[in-house]
Structure formats: C-alpha cells, structure tokens
Image: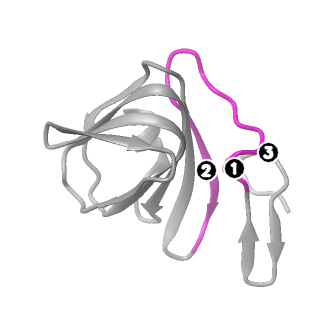
Amino acid sequence: MSLPNFVNYELVKLSEMIKASLLKEVTYNESKPKIDVLFQTEQTKEIRIALNTNQEMKEHKTPFPIVVEIVQGQIDFGVKGEKHRMDAGDLISLEGNVPHDLFVLEPSVIRLSLSKLDSVERIRNI
C-alpha cells in the first residue's frame, strides 16, 4: 500500500483496520522535532513526533482539539504558561485555541492525534 507523505515502514491495512508502530524506525533531527504522519482516519491524523533532549516546540495553538501521548521520554508541557511534567505513558487532551508549548527533558516520542481538518505543515512550522 503506497501512501504519499507517510512514514516508510510496514503499514498494514486489514479491511477496516490500519496498523502502524510508534516505536519502530524512529529517527531524530538534530535541530528540530521530527514529524511523521503514521496514518489518518476519517476523523484524525495520527502523528509521531520524535524529539531530542533540549528541543522545544514554542508556544502555539491549534484551531481544533488535540490528544497528546508521551510514548517514550519526558517533557515539560506548558499550557497557558503553566508547566506540567509528563512522563512515558502520560496522556492529555487539549481543547482548540489553547496556547501550549513543550520542552524535552530526555529523548522522547510523542503521539499527537490531530483533527483531519488541521494541517501537518502547521505542526512542522512550529
């Protein structure tokens, strides 16, 4: 199955199910977060963000609600200027138009569930 702009690893589609991995073939950029679209559904885009220690995503907002899961690592996640320590296994939801940022304390893999109506390029440009 060939999907443009998606991660190059085994993507399995079985009837109405799509399977991807958050931890296989993870790569990091030296200077900025590595953003990979794993797949999209009728409602969401499932995105993997790989970040090295001391990388950050400056304060930004999304017009739609999001869900953020820390799969691996540790980050400080800021919401309206208040920092929240997040460790592997932590999960949050955030309404649209809420200012947020993150700073990476150790190499991390984050799953971002983004509305299908939102742009992945917007994430890449943060």
Q: Mark 2 Cα within 10 Å, few/some/many (few <14, many 20+)? A: some
Q: Mark 3 Cα within 10 Å, few/some/many (few <14, many 20+)? A: few
Q: In the picture, residue 93 is in which quadrant?
A: bottom left
Residue 101: image x %, image y %? Answer: 28, 36
> Magenta region: which residues?
21-41
Q: Which residue is mark 1?
A: 6
Residue 107 left/right relative to 116: right
Q: Contact (CB < 8 A) between labels 3 and 1?
A: yes
Q: Of callouts 1 and 2, which one flags the residue occurring earlier in the amino acid sequence?
A: 1
Tag of residue 8: 3
Residue 12: image x %, image y %? Answer: 83, 66
| Residues at marks 3 and 1, CA–CA distance in whole angstroms | 6 Å
Q: Which residue is mark 2?
A: 37
Q: Contact (CB < 8 A) between labels 1 and 2?
A: yes
The residue type indicated by label 3 comes to: Asn
Q: Secondary structure at mark 3?
A: loop
Q: Secondary structure at mark 1?
A: loop
Q: Nearer the viewer, residue 80 or 35?
A: 80
Q: Quadrant of the N terminus?
A: bottom right
